[in-house]
Amino acid sequence: MENNTFVLSEKEIPTHWYNILPDLPEPLPPELHPGTKEPTILPPPLFSAAINDQEFSPENWIEIPDEVRDAYRLWRPTTLYRAYRLEKLLDTPARIYYKYEGSSPPGSHKPNTAVAQAYYGKKQGVKRLATETGAGQWGSSLAFACMLFGLECKVYMVNVSYHQKPYRRIMMETWGAQCIPSPSPDTDFGQKMLAEDPKSPGSLGIAISEAIEDAFKRDDTLYSIGSVANHVLLHQTVIGQEARKQMEMAGVYPDIIVGCVGGGSNFAGMFLPFVKDKIEGTKPDLRIICAEPTSCPTLTKGPYTWDFGDVAGMAPILKMYTLGHGFIPPPVHAGGLRYHGMAPIVCHLYKLGLVEARAVPQLATFEAGVTFARTEGIISAPETNHAIRVTIDEALKCRQSGEAKTILLAHSGHGHFDMAAYDSYLSGKLQDYDYPEAKVKEALASLPEVP
Amino acid sequence: MENNTFVLSEKEIPTHWYNILPDLPEPLPPELHPGTKEPTILPPPLFSAAINDQEFSPENWIEIPDEVRDAYRLWRPTTLYRAYRLEKLLDTPARIYYKYEGSSPPGSHKPNTAVAQAYYGKKQGVKRLATETGAGQWGSSLAFACMLFGLECKVYMVNVSYHQKPYRRIMMETWGAQCIPSPSPDTDFGQKMLAEDPKSPGSLGIAISEAIEDAFKRDDTLYSIGSVANHVLLHQTVIGQEARKQMEMAGVYPDIIVGCVGGGSNFAGMFLPFVKDKIEGTKPDLRIICAEPTSCPTLTKGPYTWDFGDVAGMAPILKMYTLGHGFIPPPVHAGGLRYHGMAPIVCHLYKLGLVEARAVPQLATFEAGVTFARTEGIISAPETNHAIRVTIDEALKCRQSGEAKTILLAHSGHGHFDMAAYDSYLSGKLQDYDYPEAKVKEALASLPEVP
């Protein structure tokens, strides 16, 4: 039997995060202050000094503190698998590998950055971190990370998700965090929203605003963010660094790397340590494909322009592909992909032609997810199913062409808290959503004016 | 930093299962036919020939078929962790290691035997396996295994659980199995039960009877069982064999091994490859502690006698510690520990003084589980929390005595589908149950008469 799994020892957990910024062929556009519209970095009262330094660091390699590596040992290095059973079912000459981040206690890649942010918060001497969460992946990861470093954690969870998905909330509480439905009476902004609509379903935009207000108002509290920002992508590069080593163990180099993108941090964590080779010209044929939902097709349909990172217009203005910060995507189950914009680093690389993008519809992603579950066993998160769809499509192209391409799939996490979505798919109730062109047009009419 | 994780490569997946039977200091009592009460082995129409042979095999080592090892590679070898963070919190000189079986796709140790049973069924040429499940751990594991070997799978799930815990049912369906509430109209026995009470909540006893009837009636179908039987414990010995190697990597041998016992297969899978040393006298001081619920204290309160393996009296009569096959335990969340009897091998070793037992109350187990989650990160199954409770208690004794004992914990699985139980605990609603002495007395009055 050929090898199915490629495992690293804990000594092989990366010692440094890889920072792509100095390696970019053209410099990344700056971030602009939402009020003054002047170039800025992350507002200092919100983030720790170390995180601030990392956001636009000129260093190629940033040392991972021992305490963070120690935390990583609870689930890293993660395993790289060869998907023999999937290959066989597809009857494809393609070789499919997947790097599985679902073995972390919260079940996804998110803690890779959560533990770093909690560590730097602790080091700066604060007592609490505040954040927002939609379906709960990020909130539970930050709850887990704060627990490891003895910090309090307050999570503002979108009201409708808080009630629809109680298990993620209970997970946060099990790790000792406080999780409340947003809008909440705990902030001025939340009170205002509740006064307007006491039964407000909430939104990620409102929850972000509450978490930022919480952190602004309290000296003992920092804000924490789960994707999009440069430092978040930086922390996620442990994925791609490990994957490189594991692909070497397997004696292969990928022809195609596939991942799903919402804010972009999971997939960037995988491909940034590889895209370097493409920039340097040693692997000109490497293809990197971002999978996104047809209902929220940021890269494939949005313009590349300046827009607010958040819905309320309190976060920095970023140069990115965007559907407009006021755009509210259809309620697909892949909550983590329902973001109007995209990490500026991913957008920049897309603009430069170094990565591609492909939009896939919801039903097709669940079909792919069930195929994956029925071959490889793992029941994947709805977000991940987008990447699995594209992986399967590429493998099927290989069947047609007869090419034995090597495909590397960034598998971001399991779907144990998304079984209701599978039920909906299996019982034929799941639906596709058309691209909401009119809504996007409307949202794009309200972009910030940048001089 | 000392090592936190001990990982094996897939080449180190055991090549043989370890069969304790020839090594026992006294022979294991036989199994008796439920009707004739004569010594028997598993009724042939129910199980495959290979499984039948394994039940009382005289061989010490039974080769694991390549196809089964190939399936094991999807999640084995599992990781052994050193619980540094837990040790630190407890301020104990004890060294705590845990072997984590929750990384299998269904989330527990159960697939170790499920894939073997599915493989032998396939090899025998049947088309389907039928089984029962309570909370769904076993049913989902068999669904997963049947999927891997291209078998149909029918799971009779206790009606009340079917409706209370839909996520496990959806998991089975995602893997292609059919799962229906029991009692069901699909069997004569189920129809009879429904005629008596159309709203019957069902019971494991009823579900077993339906699955057995299903397998009896159809030539293309075998029955499959998730614990108690000798062959199930045999298949689980991959856990202990791997753990031995990993403890050697860590340079230690356990002073104490702890696990939870319902039917006994998970913990026996861990300790059988170690108890050998105690039988042979090379490790006379090794302690092996079975953790069970105070509400269902089979080993600590039950007599050692002959009793039916199932509630309905259709399964073989086994020599075991039992609370009476008619005993229905209080509704603790650790559904997998709500069994009136115990694997005959575990009972035999307990009788011989080779293993110990300790009963722990529900609230204390959740307190231990939350402590574990807040140090090691993993949110454990309610069953596993029983073993964690005993582990913590032993580590605290070490703090008092100053002894640096090495404790090995058999961690049977995660609690991702048990978050409602954590919610109940964290919100102060969870309760303890007294030992139901009167009910046990009543059940023990109806033991089968064995000549």
Image (cartoon, coloured by chain):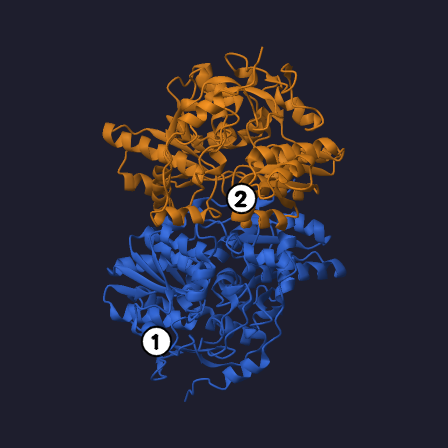
Chain colours: A orange, B blue
Tell me if residue A68 can be seen: no
Where is residue A418 shown, x and y percent of the image? 46, 46
**What residue is disc 1 on?**
B195
Dividing the picture into quadrants, the one containing residue A284 is top left
Residue in view at x 51 percent, y 73 percent:
B347
Return the residue nearer the eye: A229 or B231.
A229
Provide residue A385's location: percent of width, then percent of height: 40, 38
Quarter holding residue A296: top left
Q: Chain of mark 2?
A: A
- Identify the secondary structure beneath mark 2: helix
Q: Amino acid at mark 2?
A: Ser
Taking A229 as reference, is A153 above or below it?
below
x, y (%) of residue B103?
Answer: 48, 49
Name the one closer to the observer, A215 or A36.
A36
Mark 2 sits on what residue? Answer: A161
- The residue type indicated by label 1 comes to Ala
Q: Residue placed at 46% from the left, 84% from the top?
A: B447
Say if A164 sits above or below B223 in the image.
Answer: above
